[in-house]
Structures are given as C-alpha cells and as structure tokens.
Image (tube, helix red, strand yellow):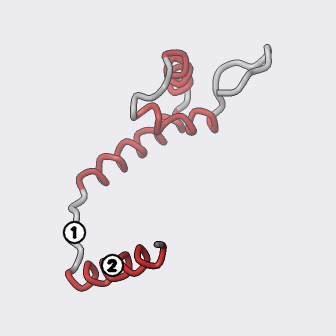
Amino acid sequence: MGARDADSVGLTCREAIGLLADYLESALSEEEIRELEEHLAGCGPCQAYLNTYRRTKDLTGKAERVAMPEEMKGRLRTFLLRALSSDG
C-alpha cells in the first residue's frame, strides 16, 4: 500500500477491493490484514464484494475440467512443432 496523509484514516473501498485476492491467498502482511479487516468490519458493500469473490473462487475451483479434443491436440502439437523448428 502507498503512503498515507496524516489526516487519512483506514482504507478506501477501492484499496480494500484491490487487496481481496491477496487476502484470500494469505499473501498480505499483518498490517495490511488488520487494515483490511477493519475496513470490512464497517463496510457492507465491501463485505458483499468479498463474499461474491469467495463464492466465485469456490465455484471456479469446483468446475469440471474438460479434456481437449484429439483434433485440437493434434493441431496444437503441429503448430508448436512448426513454431519451435522455425526459431532455431
């Protein structure tokens, strides 16, 4: 986070939302976590955004992966082999 004016208090919503991905990945410093959690405690819209973010992350993690069709694998393999052979 950037430096703050002496008169500034807490995070803005924009700053808080910018930290949510790192917050969910446990990649914030203790100070950043404290500031974010203080903001979230008093900001319903940011709490809702966090809940939506969590739900989206959970749903995408549960989405089934689809195997690449054989034709696509062949086309990709051919493309990559051509690209690699033209580099050398």
Between 52 and 67, the one nearer to me in the picture: 67
Q: For mark 2, give the secondary structure.
A: helix
Q: Around disc 1, counting alpha carbons within 10 Å, would you say few (fewer than 14), some (14 to 19), or many (20 or more)? A: few
Q: Residue 20: horizontal and vertical position, in percent? A: 49, 36
Rendered residue at 53%/25% (across/down): 36
Residue visible at 42% across and 44% down in the picture = 53
Q: Quadrant of residue 13?
A: top right
Residue type at numbered disc 1: Val
* Relative vertical location of residue 69 with respect to residue 62 in this rendering, above or below: below
Q: Position of residue 8 (x, y in %)?
A: 75, 19
Numbered label attached to residue 66: 1
- What residue sits 28% from the left and 50% below the top? 61
Residue 76, disc: 2
Label 2 sits on what residue type?
Leu
Q: Count the marks.
A: 2
Nearest the viewer among 16 and 29 is 29
Give the percent coordinates (x, y) of residue 47: 47, 34
Image position of 85 (left or right of 1): left
For marks 1 and 2, the one nearer the N-term is 1
